[in-house]
Image: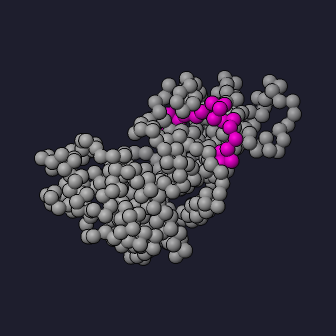
C-alpha cells in the first residue's frame, strides 16, 4: 500500500500533443476494442457520448502513466477505484473520472493486454488508492514511437477553482466541498482562465542544468488553480499548479527563461502585515513592520518575528510556546507571551486581529492582488509567473512589472507597499 505523503495522484487532464504520443494511445485503444470483441463484452458499438468518455479515460490513464515513466517519478502514481468518488455527479469532474474507470484499469492490466500493472489498496481515508505503473510492453511501445516528455500536454482544466471546508485541526487538510455556480464563481473562473490562456501560449523554457538533482521538468504544466478555504470564496485562493512553483528559488532564477530571456523574481515586502492593516482600515505606522521595539535589532530575530506574526494569523487565541521553527530565531530569554506583547504594543491598531484565524482572509486579498496584477501585465503584453507573493518576469520588464505590482496593491488595499528584486 502506498503512503499518502509520497503519493502522486492521477492527473486526468494529460493528453497526447504529437503524432508520436497519439500513436501509442491509438494502439492501446485499438487493443481494448479488440479485447472487448474477442470476449464478447460488448454487443454493439458505443454511442458517440460514451465513445468520447471511453477514449478520454484511456487517453488520460495512458498519458499519465507515460508521464510518470518519462519523468522517472519516484513517488507512487495512485488512482482511485472508489465507485462512491467516481460515480458522483460533479459538473467540474473530468470525463475520465467515471464509474467505468476501474473496469478499464482491469482491461489494461489484464494478462492478455498487459499495458499497466495495478497494486490495489485497501479502503482508506481518501478512498481506495491503487498504484499503477507501465509495463515493459508499454515502455517498448513508447520507445518504438520515440515518445518524449514534450509529446505530452494537458487539456484545459475545468476545475481551476475549488472550495474546501474549514479544517478541524492541523492534521486535517480540509474536505472538498461541492458548490453551485454563481456570478462570483463565474468571475473567479473567467479571470483565472484568461491568465491560464496567456501563460499557456507563452514562450517559457527551463534549462535542467540548473537543477541540483537530476529530474525532468514538464514545462507544459502551466494551468494555475485556486483553492478557497473555510467554506468561503473570500478565504484562501492562492495561485498554485504551475511547474515553476515546485522548483527551488535559486534553480528557478538560474534555469527559467521567458521569451528566451533570463528572469528576475520581484517580491512584495511585508505583504501579510500590510494586508492586515488594510483589513483593519488603518495605515501602517512605519516602513519596517517587523522591527519591534523591545526586541533586539538582530537579523535572525527579525525573521523570527516575521514567522511568529504570520503564525498568529492562523490560530485561534494565543500560544503558550514558541511556534515550530522559531525557537532559534527569537531571543532565548523571552517567552512567546512576552514577544507577542511587544508585537501588539508596536501595532495597537491591529493587535485585536492576531489570534483570530484571519490568515485565510489575508491569503484571499493577496491572491486577488496577484490575479489583478497578472491581468494588467497581460494587457501590457508582459508574461509573468506567480509564486505566492512574488512574480517571475523577464529582466527587461523589471521596472514596469514593479510599478504595476505596487499600483495594483495600492488600488486594492489602499495601503502602500514596496517590492524588491
Residue located 32% across and 61% down the image: 350
Question: Visible in this render: residue 113?
Answer: no
Placement of 305 over or under 8, stated as above or below: below
Residue located 31% across and 64% down the image: 349
Question: In which image quadrant can residue 64 be found?
Answer: top right
Asked whether 80 falls inside the magenta stretch, the response is yes
Placement of 59 over or under 83, stated as above or below: below
Q: Give x and y (percent) for residue 73.
A: 48, 39
- Residue 87 relative to residue 335: left or right: right
Q: Give x and y (percent) for residue 320.
A: 25, 41
Question: In which image quadrant can residue 263 be found?
Answer: bottom left
Residue located 49% across and 41% down the image: 174
Asked whether 323 falls inside the magenta stretch, the response is no
Magenta segment boundaries in residue numbering: 66-93
Is 323 in front, or is 112? 323
Q: Give x and y (percent) for residue 225.
A: 54, 54
- Residue 18 relative to residue 217: left or right: right
**Which quarter of the figure is the C terminus placed in?**
bottom left
- Residue 16 relative to residue 392: left or right: right
Residue located 64% across and 42% down the image: 60
Question: Visible in this render: residue 171?
Answer: yes
Is 1 in front, or is 36? 1
Placement of 51 over or under 354, stated as above or below: above
Q: Give x and y (percent) for residue 321.
A: 24, 41
Q: Residue furthest right?
A: 44
Question: In which image quadrant can residue 347 be found?
Answer: bottom left
Looking at the rendered structure, the number of numbered marks drawn on it comes to 0
* Colouring of the image: one colour
Amino acid at each position: 500500500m502506498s503512503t499518502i505523503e509520497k503519493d502522486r495522484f492521477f492527473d486526468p487532464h494529460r493528453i497526447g500533443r504529437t503524432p508520436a504520443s497519439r500513436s501509442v494511445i491509438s494502439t492501446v485503444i485499438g487493443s481494448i476494442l479488440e479485447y472487448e470483441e474477442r470476449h464478447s463484452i460488448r454487443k454493439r458499438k458505443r454511442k458517440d457520448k460514451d465513445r468520447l468518455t471511453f477514449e478520454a479515460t484511456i487517453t488520460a490513464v495512458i498519458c499519465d502513466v507515460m508521464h510518470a515513466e518519462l519523468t522517472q517519478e519516484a513517488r507512487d502514481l495512485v488512482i482511485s477505484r472508489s465507485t462512491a468518488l467516481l460515480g458522483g455527479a460533479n459538473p467540474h469532474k473530468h470525463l475520465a473520472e467515471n464509474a467505468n474507470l476501474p473496469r478499464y484499469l482491469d482491461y489494461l492490466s489484464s494478462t492478455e493486454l498487459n499495458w499497466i500493472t495495478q497494486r490495489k489498496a485497501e479502503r482508506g481515508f481518501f478512498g481506495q488508492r491503487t498504484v499503477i505503473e507501465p509495463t515493459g510492453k508499454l515502455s517498448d511501445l513508447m520507445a518504438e514511437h520515440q515518445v518524449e516528455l514534450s509529446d505530452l500536454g494537458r487539456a484545459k482544466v475545468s476545475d481551476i477553482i475549488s472550495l474546501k471546508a474549514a479544517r478541524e485541526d492541523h492534521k486535517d487538510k480540509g474536505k472538498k466541498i461541492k458548490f453551485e455556480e454563481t456570478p462570483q464563481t463565474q468571475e473567479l473562473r473567467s479571470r483565472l482562465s484568461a491568465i491560464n490562456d496567456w501563460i499557456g501560449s507563452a514562450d517559457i523554457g527551463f534549462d535542467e542544468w540548473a537543477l541540483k538533482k537530476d529530474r525532468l521538468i514538464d514545462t507544459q504544466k502551466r494551468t494555475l488553480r485556486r483553492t478557497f478555504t473555510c467554506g468561503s470564496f473570500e478565504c484562501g485562493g492562492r495561485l498554485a499548479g504551475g511547474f515553476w512553483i515546485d522548483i527551488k528559488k535559486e534553480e528557478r532564477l538560474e534555469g527559467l527563461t521567458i521569451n528566451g530571456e533570463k528572469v528576475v523574481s520581484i517580491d512584495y515586502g511585508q505583504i501579510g502585515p500590510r494586508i492586515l492593516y488594510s483589513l483593519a482600515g488603518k495605515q501602517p505606522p512605519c516602513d519596517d513592520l517587523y522591527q519591534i521595539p523591545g526586541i533586539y535589532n538582530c537579523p535572525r530575530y527579525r525573521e523570527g518575528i516575521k514567522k511568529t506574526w504570520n503564525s498568529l494569523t492562523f490560530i485561534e487565541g494565543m500560544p503558550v510556546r514558541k511556534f515550530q521553527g522559531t525557537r532559534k530565531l527569537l531571543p532565548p530569554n523571552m517567552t512567546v507571551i512576552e514577544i507577542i506583547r511587544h508585537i501588539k504594543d508596536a501595532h495597537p491598531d491591529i493587535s485585536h486581529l492576531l489570534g483570530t484565524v484571519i490568515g485565510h482572509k489575508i491569503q484571499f486579498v493577496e491572491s486577488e492582488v496577484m490575479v489583478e496584477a497578472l491581468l494588467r501585465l497581460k494587457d501590457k503584453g508582459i508574461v509573468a509567473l506567480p509564486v505566492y507573493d512574488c512574480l517571475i518576469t523577464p529582466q527587461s520588464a523589471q521596472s514596469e512589472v514593479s510599478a504595476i505590482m505596487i499600483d495594483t496593491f495600492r488600488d486594492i488595499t489602499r495601503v502602500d507597499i514596496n517590492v524588491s528584486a
